[in-house]
Amino acid sequence: MKSIVHLIGGEADIGHTRWFWIGLAVAIVLLFFYPTQVSSFRASNVAFYLLNVPLGLGMALLWGYCGVLSFGHVAYFGIAGYLYGIIAGNMPGNPLGPITGMIGGLVGCGLVAAIFGYFVFYARVQKWIIPILTLVFTLLLETFLGQTAGYQWRVGSVLLGGYNGMTGIPWFQLGGLVFEGYAFYYFCLVIVIACYFGLRMLMNSRFGQVTIAIREDELRAELLGYDIRARQAAIFVLSAMLAGLSGLLYVQWGNYITPSQVGLLQAALPVVWTAVGGRTSLLAVVISTLVLNWLTYTLSSQGNQYAMVIIGALLVVTMMFFPRGIVVMLAETIGRRMPRRTRAET
Amino acid sequence: MTESLPLALSLLYQLGATASFLFLAAVGLIIILGMMNIINLAHGELMMMGAYVATITHHAGLPFPIAVIVSFFFVAAFGAVLELVIVRRFYGRELGALVVTWGISLVLGQGALLFFGPFMPSIKIPGGSFSYGVFSYSVYWLILMLACALLVLALWIVYSRTTYGLQAKATMQNAEMAKSLGVPTSRIYTLTFSFGAGLAGLSGALLAPTATIAPFMGQQFVAPAFITVVVGGATNVIGGAIGSSVLLAAVKTPIGMALGAFSGSVALLVAALFIIRIMPNGISAQLQKYLDRRAQGGWR
Amino acid sequence: METPIILETCSLNKRFGGVTAAENINFKVRVGELRCMIGPNGAGKSTLFSMLCGIQGADSGQIFIAGREVTRMQAFRRVKLGVGLTFQTNRAFHELSVRENLAIPRAPVKSAGSEAGAARFAYALEVFGLDPKDETRAAELSHNQLQWLEIAMVLAAHPILVLLDEPTAGLASDETSRTAAVLKHLNSTGLTIVVVEHDMAFVKEVAQTVTVLHQGQIFAEGTVAEITSSEQVKSIYLGRA
């Protein structure tokens, strides 16, 4: 029990004071009570912000903690989403369909990531090549999915649907409990909380320490006996599966998916969330993912065509003036003002 | 024999066209990468800008070749501004540069959509076409192949015969040393980025008659350009670009002809993955090794 | 009586472009030796080290560690055979704490757990004044503490062969002699050590055998007295050879 407390509270993320933990607990409680105060439409919107969090966390894990940048993580989002649609769609009426789809989606995107990771990490390519190849990969996936219109592109009874996308994707279901409406909100919330604390513990564990050591100095880590290729590939697969988890939740939320979900604009979003939040802090990325999704939604629902221009400009400004992330830098400013316990006490 | 000659010529033409397309799509990117170690993800949008400038000026009455040259200078000037305001903060931070240029590309792509709308009438392909045997040839693509050859020659002259080229190579090798020898390294960086951006604009303008002019047209160049650069590597910039365009065209052309354009693109990515697995630093590093060995042989 | 060979290279060659970094290197170290390697700048010392531990591949030739051929073995696997290396410039993990720096090396290495290795690590911690529970970020340490931390990190994995690339670079003379004393003591417990050094006082202090590299080749090899009195060795340092 003590070791779990130690793992959660460790140095791998911001926030170690008593006030921080109280604040976090209050935020979680508020998120649990939020649906009781609003319409199911509003709750569904917030569920959409929540379901993107694993994708953001996957980016933070890969880029911030492991030092490897992927511009194509939406590919795994899309692969998992499409696989869920295919598997669950082919098992209509079967209560085990959605859970099989979830597992199939996660395993499928993990496998694709493992093959991709083998090629790039075991070749020990230069750092800049990985973002490029991941981006190319997701663009090709978009092209491929875009030309799957027509009856010949079907798997079992499910049509891939070309640029119109795949429709009629079933909700998630456990036994007789169907996760729609408010239930879906809580499903997302629980997954987000589990992902956050799970990753925070992982990064505070020895595995996390070694990951950070590899980010700091690959060669030194290798000459202490670590197979950095395997470690980086493992983190890559894990972060791809987090992206896949978001994809699974996304197709359950909207019951459809289109190829534009793996396109260039969508590919930019997780990078923006991670950069603006601060890639070396999981919590900061959770916050920025929620806030930026809210911002994008609010801007575009008001018919504001500048949404993506603003998001792009925000990315440029962040990289120029807040290279460690806006949320992280704000947190540090607040932390300096508050009385802090020293590291030795925590 | 009489039947295989037209087929061989047609294959050669397809190969040349694909290689020229890849070379044009990648040249500006590879100059900036090789000389400055900056990956410019706004490259596709700079090509889009070149295509727009050429299209607008051409519709306004400029002859097409002049419009292409105007595009080069316009986008080069824009590139200089980008370098001075944004990019220069990111030297030595490869991943930071990648991300910030992606932000720029979002702003440019969406900005073009807001400013020019989703569609613009394109330029008619100049030159028409002729046939030999059962195969037809577009005169304009033959002109583009010639343009690529001229571009290679021009790059070679710039980087081996001009003061700027000499200073740029010195800066690339060792910026500190070059600076202490009086090379204005910061101006060299501005010029190089501007030159690379200008080349992107030039390529965009040259390819404009073959493409649909739209705000997101840059995206179609992103995948081929970056694959070409990844395979080429950053050791010997021009050699890498040529080698990689030809090699990838040799992969893509037959597969694309046999199985369709999409399979050709997938073949590009798969080929790139296998090539970097064998040569992690790209063709240009391999080329450099070969040249070094020959040079050693010469000394003995 | 001669002890077994722990490290051996057979006609090792390496070129960078037109520059010869290693030419026909036949190098042998026996268990329990404390070998110093000297040579002017650019003699190929660091290149040889990086080939020995697998950072760079050789163009031709073979490398054996404890009787096993490792020429094409990945670097991390050689570490698992018991090789430890420090770099010419300090490469402790500056963003991590002293505790983490000392904890990270221990896990992956199979030979870890040897009693002699544990004793050496404990000894190094004590004489270097390092605390494995210290949460101070390594970036806040002074230069000599960082140099010592990196040596301790290498010892944490209980290696059988340690390669040190200029461990006294940037140290004051009292810190240098402390490092020398520590290395001598570690060696006396049976640890094989190969050190690249520029500081001749240090070399005279610690070395049994000295290998001189020059232009990528082994130029001379002998006792400290032989090497320091050799006119030829003096001449390459003065640039006449």
Image (cartoon, coloured by chain):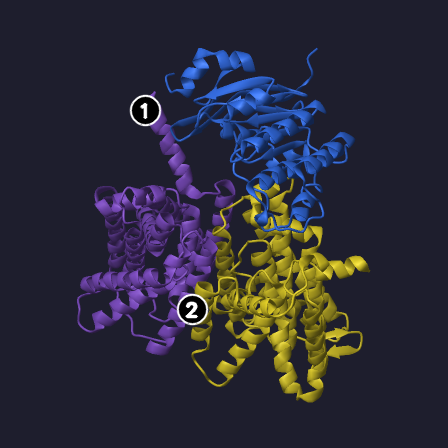
> Up-down: is C220 above or below C180?
above
Instruction: Name the image quarter holding the C terminus of chain B.
Output: top left
Instruction: Name the image quarter holding the N terminus of chain B.
Output: top left
Which chain did the renderer colour blue?
Answer: C
* Front of the two marks 2 and 1: 2
Observer-nearest residue: B159 or C83? Answer: C83
Which chain did the renderer colour yellow?
Answer: A
- Amino acid at the residue labelled 2: Leu
Q: Please determine if labels 2 and 1 lie on a single subunit.
A: yes
SS for dot 2: helix
SS for dot 1: helix
Residue at 71% across / 62% down in the picture? Answer: A9
Q: Is residue C9 visible?
A: no
* Total marks placed: 2
> Up-down: is A343 above or below A81?
above
Chain B, chosen colour in render: purple
Residue beneath disc 1:
B298
- Assess disc 2: are there few (<14), some (14-19) or many (≥20) residues with their C-alpha within 10 Å of its C-alpha: many
> Left of A65 or right of it: where is B202?
left
Residue beneath disc 2:
B106
- Quarter where residue A12 is shown: bottom right
> Left of C9 or right of it: where is B94?
left
In percent of width and height, residue A57 lies at 62, 64
